[in-house]
């Protein structure tokens, strides 16, 4: 409930404020968004299974975002930033699909 | 915790299936279970610190996603690209610009000479002659010389047929050959190759004998590479117990010419001046 309200407020704020992304953040923002999406899907799944825990969600959210950004940052320093960010996106994409599949099974039993 | 669950999930399935009502009629109880939780959570929200924090994080995520999407919409594709990608793109664009600039200068020079030059007639004549030469080489009516390769095919087993030679010819054309001569015959666009019963090959109606020698004008490296690729002309020849030998030459002379085909019916529809 509060999460849904938070999502809504976030979208509205993003539309209203229209900030420009600072240059140093540009390579990391999409990765961070994908990482956070993974955490949210994981949370949704845990919630649908009745084992949702705020603490786990908050920690996994923050850790996902930070580690993903750090990995990409490291990749940029090593000169393989493009490839590493692709890798990060692929991994999170797979996880999002796995979580979405679990949620789907819970809802539709199929 | 979540990873473990995803591994367990497939093993989980039979259990969930067995939990369904055996009559298989209504799914209502199942729907109630997954709808119940959202209903409850909307009816009586728990305002614990963790819940609020989760809500704030979700808000942050939505905010970041919207900002990112808008940033991509607003800026061009290049805005989000990496430095190394940008360098490659810039390189490509610079090269292209250079080529276009060169072409523009050439064309402009030609135009100026045609339009304003004192030697207007002369320039037009030069251009027309140049075109006639190019066309003559292409049509095989003029002898030509230039860098190229010589491809000699020895065929002791007699297994090289017109198909094989046609393949070789096609490969040479694909590799940018400008003028091609096979033994004493000039090969042009309309050239035909034919197997005849005696095991020999007719080229434009003339019988040719092995060894077959292609004289080719064109970029020697490109042509030699094209002939040498795996599964290419030389490999096919080897399959037929024949040997092909490619030698690059700084100057190849394609001396054989063919008479222009008479065209009794066609006439140029636009008068070509300066010719």
Image: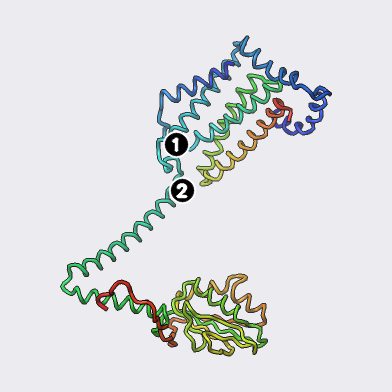
Location of mark 1 (residue):
B72
The reply to whether callout 2 and callout 1 are in contact (CB within 8 Å) is no
Badge 1: residue crowd in 10 Å (few <14, some 14–19, many ≥20) = some
**Residue A108 image position (x, y, % from top left):** 71, 27
Residue in front for this viewpoint, B218 or B205: B205
Reply above or below: B71 against A2.
below
**Residue B273 image position (x, y, % from top left):** 25, 75
Residue in front for this viewpoint, B243 or B17: B17
Location of mark 2 (residue):
B85
Looking at marks 2 and 1 on the same chain, the residue that comes earlier in the sequence is marked by 1
Chain containing the residue with disc 2: B
Q: Residue at x 49, y 74 (%)?
A: B173
**Same-subunit check for callouts 2 and 1:** yes
Badge 2: residue crowd in 10 Å (few <14, some 14–19, many ≥20) = few
Reply above or below: B75 against A17.
below
Q: Nearer the viewer, mark 2 or mark 1?
A: 1
**Residue B271 image position (x, y, % from top left):** 28, 74
**Residue A41 image position (x, y, % from top left):** 62, 28
The quadrant of the image that shows the C terminus of chain B is: bottom left
Q: Residue at x 57, y 29 (%)?
A: A36
Report the side of A38 relative to B105 (left or right): right
Chain containing the residue with disc 1: B
Query: Which numbered dot is residue A14?
Result: none
Residue in front for this viewpoint, A11 or A59: A11
Considering every residue shown, the one lying at the far top of the view is: B44
């Amino acid at each position: 409930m509060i999460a849904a309200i938070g999502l809504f407020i976030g979208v509205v704020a993003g539309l209203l404020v229209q900030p420009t992304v600072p240059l140093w953040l540009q390579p990391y923002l999409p990765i961070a968004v994908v990482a956070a999406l993974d955490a949210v899907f994981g949370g949704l799944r845990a919630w649908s299974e009745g084992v949702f825990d705020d603490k786990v969600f908050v920690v996994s959210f923050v850790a996902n975002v930070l580690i993903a950004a750090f990995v990409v940052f490291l990749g940029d320093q090593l000169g393989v930033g493009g490839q590493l960010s692709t890798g990060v996106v692929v991994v999170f994409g797979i996880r999002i699909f796995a979580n979405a599949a679990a949620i789907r099974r819970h809802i539709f039993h199929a | 915790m979540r990873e473990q669950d995803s591994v367990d999930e497939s093993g989980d399935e039979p259990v969930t299936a067995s939990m369904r009502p055996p009559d298989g009629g209504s799914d209502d109880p199942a729907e109630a279970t997954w709808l119940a939780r959202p209903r409850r959570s909307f009816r009586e929200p728990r305002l614990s610190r963790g819940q609020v924090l989760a809500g704030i994080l979700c808000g942050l995520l939505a905010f970041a996603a919207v900002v990112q999407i808008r940033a991509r919409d607003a800026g061009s594709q290049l805005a989000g690209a990496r430095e190394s990608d940008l360098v490659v793109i810039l390189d490509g664009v610079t090269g292209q610009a250079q080529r276009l600039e060169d072409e523009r200068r050439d064309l402009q020079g030609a135009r100026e000479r045609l339009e304003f030059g004192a030697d207007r007639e002369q320039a037009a004549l030069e251009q027309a002659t140049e075109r006639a030469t190019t066309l003559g080489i292409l049509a095989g009516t003029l002898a030509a010389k230039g860098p190229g390769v010589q491809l000699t095919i020895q065929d002791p087993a007699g297994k090289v047929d017109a198909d094989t030679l046609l393949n070789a010819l096609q490969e040479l054309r694909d590799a940018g050959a400008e003028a091609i001569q096979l033994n004493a015959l000039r090969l042009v666009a309309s050239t035909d190759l034919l197997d005849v019963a005696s095991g020999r090959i007719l080229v434009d109606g003339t019988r040719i004998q092995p060894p077959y020698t292609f004289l080719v004008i064109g970029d020697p490296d490109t042509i030699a590479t094209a002939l040498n690729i795996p599964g290419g002309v030389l490999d096919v020849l080897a399959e037929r117990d024949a040997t092909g030998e490619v030698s690059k030459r700084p100057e190849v002379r394609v001396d054989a010419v063919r008479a222009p085909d008479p065209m009794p019916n066609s006439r140029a529809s636009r008068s070509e001046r300066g010719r």
